[in-house]
Image: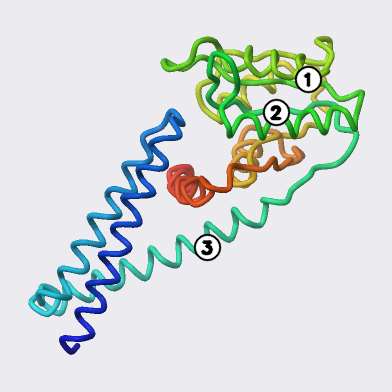
Amino acid sequence: MGTTARQVVFGTCMVLAFACVCYAWAVFKTHSGTNFWMVWVVFAVLFEVLGGGFLFHWWDAMPRLIRGILVALICIAVVAFGTVEGCIVSKMGAQGKPGLDYVIVLGAQVHRARPSRVLKFRLDKAIEYLNDNPKTICIVSGGQGSNEPFPEAQGMADYLKTNGIAESRIVEESKSKTTEENIINSRKLIADENASVGIITNDFHVFRAMQIAQKNGLDDAQGIAAGSPPDMLVNNMVREFFAEIKFLL
């Protein structure tokens, strides 16, 4: 590779590293309750190392075997990422069937006066579905995290009631800490084993949520995709990739 090409690669990597740092700051400022913004800092460092490797000939200095292994690992990672993201996208438009007996709304962070942005999308979708299907019962599922003023289920129920959903149609499940616990504990609140069930969550989360539901006996559960904050979609899609790999392992 010539000097000009090396400089172009280096410059591109530096631009990508700077973009990752800026995006990390944007994610951090959302106060989403997770530390995933740090992953973007790691990506920035990796781009800097990659750029430096080309500019300063570190890559050429590596033994051919090591370079081959690194290229193979990168190819595997790219294929895995593309495959998982394709699966995630395939469920992002899921709407479920009308007339379900129950819908389970998966919890996310709540603030004292309002739900988080991600959770608001889920709750607004639940309100839409419940208004269209007046016989459906809604289970709101989520416990209380260390950075939350009360259980997520309580905040979710309050939001639904404020927006016109009758209290008699809302069941609170306030012990769960994970998506799997959301589904397991919510299922225990459904007396009829033959009841039809929908699971409401953000579009990027539907694919894995349905896998977890099927793993825990809700084989016929319907995914219902709510929207998600557009500015956080890249972050959420990348985060979901790692969550899916963890689930599969």
Q: How many marks?
A: 3
Nearer to the camera, 235 or 220: 235
Relative vertical location of residue 104 with respect to residue 94 in this rendering, above or below: above
Q: Secondary structure at mark 3?
A: helix
Q: Earlier in the sequence, mark 1 or mark 2?
A: 2
Q: Nearer the viewer, mark 1 or mark 2?
A: 1
Relative vertical location of residue 188 with respect to residue 95 in this rendering, above or below: above
Q: Position of residue 74 (x, y in %)?
A: 32, 67
Q: How is the image coloured?
A: rainbow
- The residue at the point 79 percent across, 25 percent down is 193
- The residue at the point 59 percent across, 46 percent down is 204
Per the image, the residue denoted by label 2 is: 123
**Spatial CA span between label 3 and label 1:** 39 Å
Per the image, the residue denoted by label 1 is: 163
Q: Is residue 69 left or right of residue 162?
A: left
Q: Which mark is residue 83?
A: 3
Q: Position of residue 150 (x, y in %)?
A: 54, 10
Q: Secondary structure at mark 1?
A: loop
Q: Amino acid at mark 2?
A: Leu
